[in-house]
Amino acid sequence: MSKGSERADASSRAVGDVKLEGGIQAPASTPRAGIPMTGGPVKPLVHWKWLAVGWVAAMAFGALYAIWLQDGSDWNVGAPWERSLMYWLQTTYRRPIDDVFLAVPWIATHYTLIPIILGAAAWLKFKWKRNDLALQLVVVEIGTWTLNQLPKALYDRDRPQLWEHRGQYAQASYPSGHAIAAIAVLVTIAAIAHRERGWKWPYAVVALVLVVNLYSRLYLGVHWPSDVIAGIGMGGIWLLASLKAFPGRGDIRSRPASSASRPVSPDSI
C-alpha cells in the first residue's frame, strides 16, 4: 500500500471513529450524515386513531346495551333479576363500614377527579416537563366525562326507587359514571405509576377501591345493576384504547444506559 493511501485511510478512520487504548475503535460522538443519534425511532406522543376508535367503541357498547335493555318493559323500574339482586343485597352496615361505602364513591366522581387531574397534569407539565403524562391524564378524564354525560342525556333512565337513596349521585341512572371513571381514570393512574416508577402496589389499591365503589352503587340504592355493567364495559373499552394510544417513554428498565455503556466522545479521551 502506498503512503498516500495509508494517510487517506487513517484520515477516514479519524473522522468516523475514536482510537482507544489497545487498538479498539469506538464510534465518535459526531453524528454522520443521515444517521440519527437517538438510538432508535422516536415514539409518537399519542396515537389519536386509537383514542377515536376506543371512544366510539365505548359509546357504541353503551348505546347497544341500552337499546337491548329498552326492548323490554323494565327500563325505568329494573328487570326482575335486577330488583331481586338489589333486594338480596339490601342491608345497612354499622359504622364505620357504612361510612366507607358513603365516602369511597367520592374518589371516582368527576366533582373530585376533574380538579385532581388538572392539578396533577399541571404539576407533571411544569415541574417535571412530562407533557406526555399530563396529556394522557387530561385526555382520559375528558373521554370518561363525555362517555358518562352523553348517554345520561340521551337515555334519561330513572334511578331505582326501591329504598331511600344515599351518598353521592346526580343526573340520570344510566350508565354508572362512577364505574366508568373508576376503571378508566384510576387504573390509568396505576398503570402510569407502574410504567414510570415500577410500582405494582397502586394496582392493589385501585382494585380495592374499584370493588368497594361498584358495590356501593347498589348498596346505596342509586344504580341498577345494568347501569354498573354498562359502566364497566364502557370504562374498560376506553381504558384499553387510551393505554394503547399513549405508549409512554418506557418503564424504569428502559431508562438511558449508564455512562459506562454510552458512546465515547473524543473530548473525554
Image: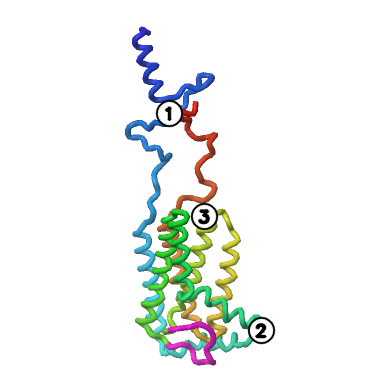
Residue identified by numbered label 3: 195
Under mark 2, the amino acid is Arg
Gap in angstroms between the C-alphas marked 1 and 2: 69 Å
For this orientation, the residue located farthest to the top is 2
Marked residue nearer the N-terminal end (1 or 2): 1
Closer to the eye: label 3 or 1: 1
Whichever of labels 3 and 1 marks the residue nearer the N terminus, that label is 1
- At which x and y percent is residue 64? 38, 76
**Relative depth, front residue between 209 and 129:** 129
In the image, which disc is placed on residue 95?
2
Residue at left offset 57%, top offset 68%: 207
Residue 167 lies in the magenta stretch: yes
Q: Which residue is mark 1?
A: 28
Q: Residue 172 is drawn in which quadrant?
A: bottom left
Give SS at disc 2. Answer: loop
Judge whether 82 appears above or below 61 on screen: below
Region rendered in magenta: 158-170
Secondary structure beneath dot 1 equals: loop
Relative vertical location of residue 255 with respect to residue 27 in this rendering, above or below = below
Mark nearest the camera among 3 and 2 is: 2
